[in-house]
């Protein structure tokens, strides 16, 4: 199916058959990424009376009880309720069926603070998109920003980030994204913040919260952060539609599955054919 859409007054098309999954498969019995030393995601066969929830063990069907901590077990989406006394839930925040987003490949920088995404690296990636594609829409606001850090090793799919000083976003970089008006930020690192930053300063900046306290009244309750995505190298930087799928958890965070569809600019009927 082809969707035609208008963004900032320009006509685009998106082929829904070209959708790509940017989540990390959550293998309950196999290798998993892990962050913040949180327990692994587990699925345990349900048992009760004569019932066993495993057909290989003689059960009538398969039926497992799942234990998960979204923040540590792979791709997940969280909302301002992660930090506030108001238990705002991600289900009520993620309501867009599809939103326009820009995919950016961003080189990591080694600093004395650690390995970081800098505002300068984000700006370079944006400049490359503007030069190499016909998206003249920046700096018009995209609803979403997808950050793929380089190098883009597939080991991100099962890396134990816990205790390894994983890359994070520098304060200037988060401020830049927040000030662009991005509502949904998706990253392939385990957290916007330095692993040992108990104040979650980068999260607070993105959600417009003060440095301390757990009041939600001043924050952006319509913004989400999605962490530990994986974006295949085959996908080039540029314009996508995002369908951010989450289970209906009434919690600050839930596992998620961002599905992204490449968007192409439509030629207008009267534009001259450059090959003639
Ligand atoms: Zn998280």
Image (cartoon, helix red, strand yellow):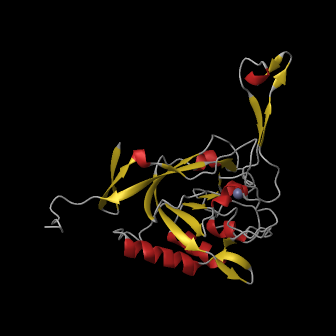
Quadrant in which residue 167 is drawn:
bottom right
Say how many tags the image has: 0
Query: Is residue 20 visible from the viewing direction of this image?
Result: yes
In front: 43, or 249? Answer: 43
Quadrant in which residue 224 is drawn:
bottom right
Quadrant in which residue 121 is drawn:
bottom right
Q: Is residue 87 above or below residue 167?
A: above
Residue at 74% across, 22% down: 55
Question: Is 42 left, or right, of 260 in this rendering?
Answer: right
> Where in the figure is residue 255, as x and y percent of width and height?
66, 47
Name the quadrant of the C terminus.
Answer: bottom left
Question: Is 8 left, or right, of 49 in this rendering?
Answer: left
Name the quadrant of the N terminus.
Answer: top left
Extreme residue toward the right, this view:
49
> Where in the figure is residue 273, as x and y percent of width and height?
16, 65
Q: Is residue 119 above or below residue 246?
A: below
Residue at 44% across, 57% down: 240
Q: Is residue 179 above or below residue 256?
A: below
Extreme residue toward the top, this view:
50
| Ligand 1 located in image quadrant | bottom right
> Where in the figure is residue 89, as x and y percent of width and height?
66, 48
In front: 175, or 195? Answer: 195
In front: 255, or 181? Answer: 255
Question: Is 275 left, or right, of 203 in this rendering?
Answer: left
């Amino acid at each position: 199916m082809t969707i035609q859409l208008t963004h900032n007054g320009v006509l685009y098309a998106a082929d829904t058959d070209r959708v790509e999954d940017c989540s990390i498969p959550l293998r309950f019995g196999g290798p998993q990424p892990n962050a913040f030393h949180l327990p692994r995601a587990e699925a345990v066969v349900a048992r009760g009376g004569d019932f066993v929830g495993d057909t290989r063990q003689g059960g009538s069907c398969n039926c497992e009880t799942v234990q998960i901590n979204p923040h540590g077990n792979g791709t997940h989406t969280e909302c301002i309720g992660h930090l506030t006394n108001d238990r705002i839930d991600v289900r009520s925040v993620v309501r867009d069926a599809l939103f326009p987003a820009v995919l950016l490949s961003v080189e990591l920088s080694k600093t004395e603070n650690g390995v970081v995404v800098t505002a300068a690296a984000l700006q370079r990636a944006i400049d490359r998109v503007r030069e190499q594609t016909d998206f003249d829409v920046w700096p018009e606001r995209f609803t979403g920003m997808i950050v793929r850090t380089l190098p883009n090793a597939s080991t991100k799919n099962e890396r134990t980030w816990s205790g390894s000083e994983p890359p994070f976003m520098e304060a200037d970089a988060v401020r830049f994204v927040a000030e662009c008006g991005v509502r949904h930020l998706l990253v392939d690192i385990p957290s916007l913040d330095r692993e040992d930053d108990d104040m979650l300063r980068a999260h607070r900046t993105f959600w417009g919260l003060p440095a301390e306290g757990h009041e939600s009244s001043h924050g952006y309750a319509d913004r989400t952060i999605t962490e530990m995505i994986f974006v295949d190298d085959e996908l080039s930087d540029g314009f996508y539609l995002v369908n951010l799928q989450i289970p209906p958890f009434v919690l600050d965070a839930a596992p998620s599955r961002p599905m992204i569809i490449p968007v192409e600019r439509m030629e207008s009927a009267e534009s001259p054919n450059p090959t003639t």
